[in-house]
Amino acid sequence: MNTEIANNVPRELPIAMLTESPTNPRRNFDEGFLKGLASSIQSQGVLASLLVRPKDQRYEIVFGAQRFRAAQIAGKEIVPVEIRDMTDAQVMEAQLVENLQRRDVHPLEEARSFKGLLDLEEPTYSIEQIAAKIGKPPAYVATRLKLTELAEVVVEEFYREEIGVGHALLLAKLPLDKQEEALKACFREDWSASSDRKAKRILLPVRNLQTWIEQNILLVLKDAPFDKKDAHLVAIAGSCVDCPKRTGHNKLLFSDLGKQDACTDPSCYQAKVDAHVANTIAAKPKLVQISTGYTKPQEGSAIVPRGKYVAIASEKPKDKEQAQRPQFKTCKFTTEAIIADGDGKGEVHKVCANPACPIHHPKKQQQPNVDASFKAQQEKERREQAIGYTTSVRTLTAITAAVPVRLMKRDLLFVAERLAAMLNDNHLAGLARQHGIKPAKEGDSIVKLFTAYLRRVEESKLGSVMVELTIILAASRGNSATVLRDAAAVYKIDTDAIALKVKQEFSAKEKAKKAPKPAAKVVAKAKKAA
């Protein structure tokens, strides 16, 4: 290389002496854009110099790769450059800054720039230092960095703009083996608009993917049946406390989950549950093993199916009637049992699994002299009930099969009207007032008025009314506070903030009532009297 070439001085170099930078964040080049740029270069030349640095007897392009490629397409042999001595760290930093100044920077390319800086041995960078340099909060850098951990199939969809950055950021937080499954949840299939017998993929909003992940991937650790601090439960996994797959381990990355601490690796979680069950049974060989399913266990299995035991309720009965139910009674056969199969696996409950227990498994009294005609009548009734039940189930199956993937207004209206019909008059009247529905004259049916309201509102409004009706209906069955709290959690509503605001409003009203009336009103009355 000619070492006499002055640095920081614009000059021209042969294209053959230039090489592209391996740390260039841009990995995808728009061929159409390059051809357009090449056409411009053919007529006007390369107007802006490429920044290069001497390296390995040639010159590495720090930035200007698009101009370099377009110049090659245009058939140019030399291009204007600015030569500058730069360290690897300075190159990456310059590329990062230049990359962020571009309008069309892809989030994945930006993420690779961040990772490149973090991987430098000298000088060292932290997430906070990078954030300060680009004027963004640390959480922004942390979430962007996770994009470098996307599965290849997700990267392809992301570059093709089949999914948005919001979807990609959520997928990147998941283990690789779960990303492809979650990717499918980003879309729904629409067969109605298809003419070639192929379903059209419709991208769903980010909140749909968030809900799917919360319901299918994230496992709240406070509900785990095993000891989260036990590093030896599954040796290869270690303790949950130190696990990087725990949302609480990286609060910058999972800041949207608040204080909730969850596991993002269902396979590891399940392995720990299995190990916990095995260890518990080994420590207590006489512990009863139960299943929450009714399926008959495999031959030789020690697991007792759901229909063969009564789980003793941990809470106290609410009234005398409830106290008479078997699950609220104890007996001399009551013992501890671990759920070895089904929902809640690993949890320990008290049960009675003794079929001879007169309290929990009373024997049916046999009537020795039952009239033959009475038996025949019973058999007939059982048969009619079975026919009726089977018919209902199959009808319901046919109805659900006919429901489209995306509910139309007729479907929403059907559900909303049926839910409204299940409310009592007081609840329905209260809901109607919330929506500004008032009887025009005494005797007007609130049911008819509300039904008419449902039929004229927009389709988008029907969805929220359905949720409202479901909450009111569930709350009317008892434990309304729990129902409302659960609903608020699903839709991420800050109930504490609402409660505080209501208290403040009531306090303000009470204060206004106690305040003395303004003198202006007294003066106004005196003038009127005069």
Image (cartoon, grey):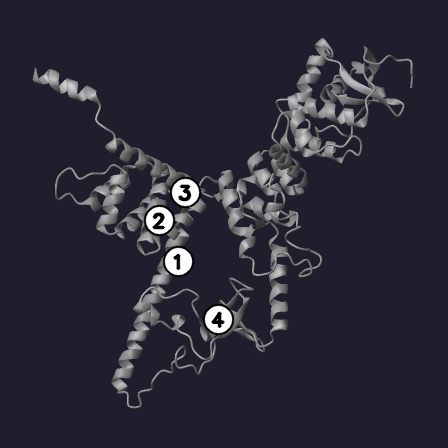
Give the answer, above or below, for where 389 lies relative to 470: below
Q: Earlier in the sequence, mark 4 or mark 3?
A: 4
- Distance from disc 4 to disc 3, alpha carbons, whole Å, reads 35 Å
Identified by mark 4, the residue type is Lys
| Left or right of 2, for residue 245 | left
Q: Which residue is mark 2?
A: 471
**Percent position of residue 304, x then y:** 51, 74
Q: Residue at x 31, y 44 (%)?
A: 413
Identified by mark 2, the residue type is Ile
- Is disc 1 placed on a helix, strand or loop? helix
- Quadrant assignment for the N terminus: top right
**Percent position of residue 275, x then y:** 64, 64
Q: Which residue is mark 3?
A: 495
Q: Quadrant of residue 380?
A: bottom left
Q: Are marks 3 and 1 in contact (CB under 8 Å)?
A: no
Q: Farthest residue toward the left?
A: 530
| Left or right of 402, for residue 155 | right
- Distance from disc 3 to disc 1, alpha carbons, whole Å, reads 38 Å
Observer able to see residue 198: no
Identified by mark 3, the residue type is Thr
Q: Farthest residue toward the top?
A: 44
- Distance from disc 2 to disc 1, alpha carbons, whole Å, reads 25 Å
Front: mark 2 or 1 = 2
Q: Are marks 3 and 2 in contact (CB under 8 Å)?
A: no
Q: Nearer the viewer, residue 132 or 437?
A: 132
**Percent position of residue 134, x then y:** 65, 25
Q: Which mark is residue 397?
A: 1
